[in-house]
Amino acid sequence: MELYDIGLIGLAVMGQNLVLNMERNGFKVAVYNRTRATTDGFIREKGAGKQIKAVYSLKDLVGLLKRPRKVFLMVKAGPPVDEMIQQLKTLLQPGDLIIDGGNSFFQDTERRSREIESEGYLYIGTGVSGGEEGALKGPSIMPGGSPEAYILIEPIMKAIAAKVNGDPCVTHIGPRGSGHYVKMIHNAIEYGDMQLIAEAYDILHRGLGLSAQELHQVFSQWNEGPLSSYLIEITSDIFALTDGETGQPLVDRILDSAGQKGTGKWASQNAFDLGIPIPTINAAVEARNLSAFKREREKASSTFPVTSLSYSGNRRTFTEETGDALYASKICSYAQGLALLRAASSEYQYDLNLAEIARIWRGGCIIRARFLDDVSRAYQEDPDLLNLILAPFFREALLQRQKAWRRVLKTAIELAVPVPAMSASLAYFDSYRSSRLPANLIQAQRDYFGAHTYRRIDREGIFHTEWKK
Ligand code: 6PG
């Protein structure tokens, strides 16, 4: 009987494209989907004439795999993953490997990997980024699990991953839930990037009155410089597309209410748990939340009409400065995401290699960017870097753009264009580089009303004062 290299469960678009990618790279894949019609449709169309075997039961899937068996789950995150694992465990044998490639919550992956490994099976929870196209042509892959588990899947992952200068965008991230943790931070940074770009668009469009065609040009130009990235590139494309029905730029016809599946929110929740400030990312999550209140916003916009929306300065210079503000804000956003990774690495004993993580984000994933070469280099030069903004390259980049950054934010505030993420980045910068913050007053207040005590700058010890004399 012919045996297969890997079995994949879950034939939604991402699952289908991963199968096609594996097959193209010479692996024989057996596939199963709960709904038979989906499997049949896949084999009839995209999978036709390929080394892909469709099966209609988990028993048949497991029976067809080379040992140790490798089963790749691309099912919906949450209870469906647990259900599938329960069923698979009755069919697999110790030493076989289950890989969860969905956007699972990292604590679920922690629990699952401990349970499954204690029963003798191997487990990998892996982030897979790049959307549909990435899955097909080469995603960035973030696998977490034991080294024994990773070795089994490494050849397939290296083959299917995106390549940057021949380097596959995959690395063994660390144990247990670390792969899904890193994917969660990737998504949080993705939220930050998207919101910062949206704010730059808002400043230029609503504030300066640039048309979609002009925005297309500005973003194309930005894509040639230090901002060069997948998200800037697709944003430029978006501005170029006209709606067939109305003849208007399609982007103007889209309802301004952003969706989300939860990975950004998880990162914010986790950052609060670990006590790590990620204000730009939090602002991005909250901006999506606020956008959803469309009706209320419409009502409030007639209560508080904006009257002073016109910019009188040099539009060309200001557009360039908006690019500077975007780049400086982006540096601070990544600094926050990476600081959270650093804290999580010690909290959860993940032993993360930040240079490697930045390296595998250079290609395939949604946040892929030229910028990540510089991030990776900064951590190669100093693996113990306290904060990205302290790396010489980024220090210079911030110092060069600081004035423009402040000017753009001042103008946005005057024009009443909301800039929650950009201003959170600037406040992060100004707070982080302040040797003295007003927290002395907060400590005094806490001690005043609750005898919470305080420490002094000039003496050791814990102090309390009877403030009301
Ligand atoms: C990726 C993306 C992907 C994510 C979507 C939607 O890396 O390929 O991060 O995993 O699920 O972009 O996320 P939201 O619906 O939360 O915006």
Image: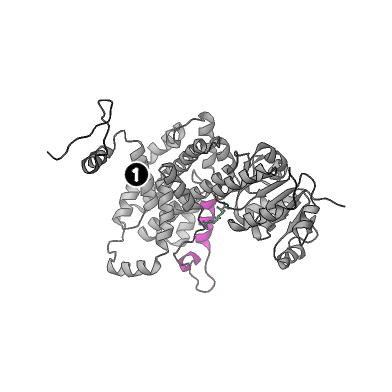
User: What residue is at 35 percent from the left and 66 percent from the top?
Assistant: 297
Magenta-drawn stretch contains 233: yes
State the quadrant of the C terminus.
Answer: top left
Which residue type does callout 1 highlight? Ala
Name the side, left or right, on which 345 lies relative to 99: left
* Picture colour scheme: one colour
Residue furthest out toward the right: 1
User: What residue is at 35 percent from the left and 58 percent from the top?
Assistant: 207
Q: Check the image and report above or below for 379 versus 270.
A: above
Which residues fall within the magenta stretch? Answer: 229-256
Q: Check the image and report above or below for 383 versus 422.
A: above
Instruction: Describe the element under mark 1 as helix, strand or loop.
Output: helix
- Residue to which mark 1 is pinned: 427
Quarter of the rendered image showing ligand 1: bottom right
Front one among 297 and 29: 29
Front one among 47 and 401: 47
Residue furthest out toward the left: 469
- Badge 1 crowding class, 10 Å Cα cut-off, few under 14, some 14 to 19, many 20 or more, is some
Q: Dividing the picture into quarters, in which one does residue 351 lie?
A: top right
Residue 457 appearing in the image? yes
Q: Residue 191 in the image: x percent, y percent? A: 48, 52
Magenta-drawn stretch contains 268: no
User: What residue is at 43 percent from the left and 36 percent from the top?
Assistant: 389
Residue furthest out toward the top: 459
Q: Dividing the picture into quarters, in which one does residue 119 lie?
A: top right
Q: Residue 161 in the image: x percent, y percent? A: 66, 46
Count of marks, rendered view: 1
Q: Residue 217 in the image: x percent, y percent? A: 48, 55
Q: Residue 60 in the image: x percent, y percent? A: 79, 57
Tell me if the residue at label 1 has its CB under 8 Å from ligand 1.
Answer: no
